[in-house]
Amino acid sequence: MTQTVHPFALELKNLRKSFGKTEIIRGIDMVVKPGERVGIIGPNGAGKSTLFNLISGRFEPSSGEILLGGYRVDGKKPFEINRMGLSRSFQITNIFPKLSVFENLRCGVLWSLGYKYTFLKFLLDLDDANDRAEELMEMVHLDKKRHTLAMNLTYAEQRALEIGITIAGGANVILLDEPTAGMSKSETSRFIRLIREVTEGKTLLTVEHDMGVVFGLADKIAVVVYGELLAFDSPDAVRADARVQEAYLGSVVAQAQAGQS
């Protein structure tokens, strides 16, 4: 029997979140197709991180629905959502500093293979986990740093390692929270290529302040302003949207257009 693939990887239906009397997310509706790359932009305090926290289960919605591959995940715990095929990274690098690159990646793999927490003395015998960790190490171009402790990697290498850990479980929907923050232009350029490589065929949502990154990486851009979805369209359409220019992009768009002329 052929398994039916749901037409939407992620759906948000009238999603709302309030903290006390303050409504942070105000009725967002959005659908993301499998394989789409979506950049989420908006001014500081717009609700972007809150939206990520809702989707990944760190916050529970005040109302509305979140569906992953057609199944509701609102109200589920983060680890339950992760098992259903969603993984995320964070603004602050989330790695084990005193473990090697290989050991970090193997930890990311273990849970997905059903080993949960395994005594270290048994790890050498877990060929499938070790093979997958080796594969990931090459994917994020850290194979030459196999035995290097994570704390001794450069910042860009630590971020690459975190990407490896994020995709280790084989999730189909990946959330990256400001993946290029703190990087130089050259590091950012290399990192975007890496993100493209390792998320090929996967659904990607990323919160990012660097407009060059957003417009260069995303198939569609979601503009969140004051907790509402102001626009959700192709980069060209968003760039030309007068409401978006007025509310957020403004001089950034003007500069980009001037540079292209």
Image: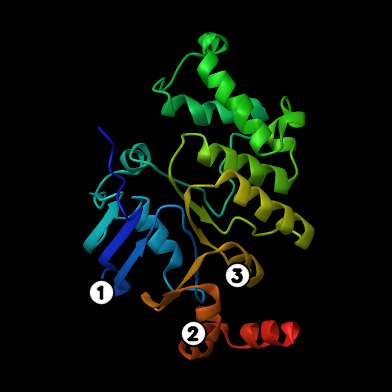
> Which is nearer the N-term, disc 1 or disc 3?
1
What's the distance in space between the residues labelled 3 and 2, CA to CA? 14 Å
Q: In x, y percent, where is residue 174?
A: 47, 49
The residue that label 3 is drawn on is 215
Residue 104 picture location, percent across and down: 59, 30
Which quadrant of the figure contains the N terminus?
top left
Secondary structure state at the residue bearing disc 2: helix
Q: Residue 167: x, y in percent?
A: 52, 40
Mark 1: give few (<14), some (14-19) or many (20+) Cα within 10 Å: few
Identified by mark 2, the residue type is: Val
Real-space Cα separation, disc 1 to disc 3, in angstroms: 35 Å
Quarter occupied by the C terminus: bottom right
Residue at figure coordinates x 26%, y 46% from the top left:
76
Q: Earlier along the polypeptide chain: callout 2 or callout 1? A: 1
Tell me if residue 98 can be seen.
no
**Circle 2 residue:** 244
Residue beneath label 1, please? 21
> Would you say the residues marked 2 and 1 are in contact, meaning their CB atoms lie under 8 Å apart?
no
Mark 3 or 2, nearer chain start: 3
